[in-house]
Image (spheres, rainbow, N blue to C red):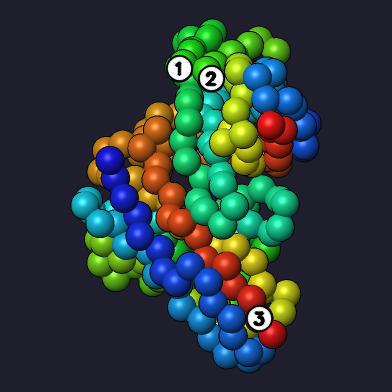
Amino acid sequence: GAVVSQHPSRVICKSGTSVKIECRSLDFQATTMFWYRQFPKKSLMLMATSNEGSKATYEQGVEKDKFLINHASLTLSTLTVTSAHPEDSSFYICSTYPPGQGPKGYTFGSGTRLTVV
Amino acid sequence: GENVEQHPSTLSVQEGDSAVIKCTYSDSASNYFPWYKQELGKGPQLIIDIRSNVGEKKDQRIAVTLNKTAKHFSLHITETQPEDSAVYFCAASAGPFAGNMLTFGGGTRLMVKP
């Protein structure tokens, strides 16, 4: 089946620094990537939707200058948390799907646990 | 937009017993309802799904039922095993087409005691 590789799995950074999270589709071209944030013991909240070659669409309340999304190729989308603060600490998950497939084909990355100290 | 409510938030059962998790949704246009299992530190994995034209679907020990009139759907796990312990999420989508967003329920932490 479709595989989405997400890196890093864990990252600890200092306040004020930036962190980049990568998601790659390993065996298919991913036109669209969903980025989620998950707080401890909470559900997945959609942050933004990135589309290859165009600007990402952010959900209400998500700062686009804080969470930079780049989807420059059909196999790679990145989320950069800029000037990170402790409140940005969370579990970030990406999800995408092979061309033409609907929600049934959505595949999730393994997640990135970000800790800002 | 769509709102998905999930209950209970935690569920503890003895090994071999059944577990039932219930979800309700608000948007009558939703017609695809997947269930995901998330283990600690990992991304969600699809375990079963159901479309609105079906009332029940079963796959070995897991089954899902859908009441479209009442806008609720449930996950049933029979003969639970310790490895079933995880967080389960229900979700709803407005359609089967590529790009349709998923709205997730709040999650249920299932603990199966040996």
Task: Tell me the element at label 1.
Answer: strand
Task: Tell me the element at label 2.
Answer: strand
Residue at image position (66%, 89%) is: A15
Which is closer to the viewer, label 3 or label 1? 1
Is any atom of residue A87 visible in this view? Answer: yes
Q: Which quarter of the figure is the N terminus of chain A placed in?
A: top left
Residue type beneath disc 3: Val
Residue B29, quarter of the rendered image: top right
Q: Which chain carries label 3?
A: A
Question: How far is the residue under mark 3 from the one under mark 1?
Answer: 42 Å
Counting from the top left corner in percent of width and height, residue A18 is at 53, 86
Q: Which quarter of the figure is the C terminus of chain A placed in?
A: bottom right
Residue at image position (53%, 71%) is: A10
Question: How far is the residue under mark 2 from the one under mark 1?
Answer: 5 Å
State yes or no: discs 2 and 1 in contact (Cβ < 8 Å): yes
Question: How far is the residue under mark 3 from the one under mark 2?
Answer: 39 Å
Pointer 3: what residue?
A116
Residue type beneath disc 2: Ile
In-front residue for pair A117/A65? A117
Pointer 1: what residue?
B59
Do badges 3 and 1 share one subunit? no
